[in-house]
Amino acid sequence: MKIKKNIAISDSGFIFNPDTGESFTANPMGLEILDMLKEGLDLAEISKRIMARYKTEKDTVEKDYSDFINMLEQYNLLVHD
């Protein structure tokens, strides 16, 4: 899955969906995940990077990732490969 190409994301975490006119704000961790999704990384690679950087547990990362992805899907910001 990837972020839709027309979604605008600022360096500060401001997200704008031109299709709906809605805007959102991501926290720093959300912004990191968005950047990794834009790179085309999958859950395994994203988890690996986050666990290495923040010294956290795999279960915690995967739950938080899943919650964040569900939110992105709810707001129609993702496209599935």
Image: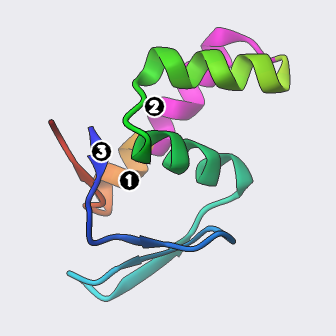
Q: Residue at x 51, y 18 (%)?
A: 45
Q: Report the quarter where the N terminus lies.
A: top left
Residue 2's tag is: 3
Give the alpha-carbon distance from disc 3 to disc 2, as whole Å.
14 Å
| Residue 40 numbered mark, or none | none
Viewer-nearest residue: 75 or 37 = 37
Farthest residue, direction left: 81
Most common secondary structure along the magenta stretch: helix
The crowding category of the residue bearing disc 3, from other C-alpha atoms within 10 Å (few below 14, some 14 to 19, many at least 20), is: some
Of mark 1 and mark 2, the one earlier in the sequence is 2
Specify the quadrant of the image occupied by residue 66: top left
Which residue is tagged 1?
72
Tell me residue 75's x, y (percent).
Answer: 32, 63
For disc 1, the neighbor class at 10 Å (few under 14, some 14 to 19, many from 20) is: some
Asked if marks 1 and 2 touch (Cβ < 8 Å), the reply is: no
Does residue 51 lie above or below 32 as drawn? above
Q: Is residue 60 above or below residue 5?
A: above
Q: Secondary structure beneath disc 1?
A: helix
| Relative to 13, 65 lies left or right | left
| Three-letter residue code for mark 1 | Leu
As for residue 61 lying within the magenta part, the answer is: yes
Residue 24 in the image: state x and y as whole percent.
50, 74
Considering every residue shown, the one lying at the far bottom of the view is 21
Label ID, residue 66? 2
Q: Are marks 3 and 2 in contact (CB under 8 Å)?
A: no
**How much space separates mark 1 and mark 2, taking CA atoms?**
10 Å
Give the residues in magenta. 56-68
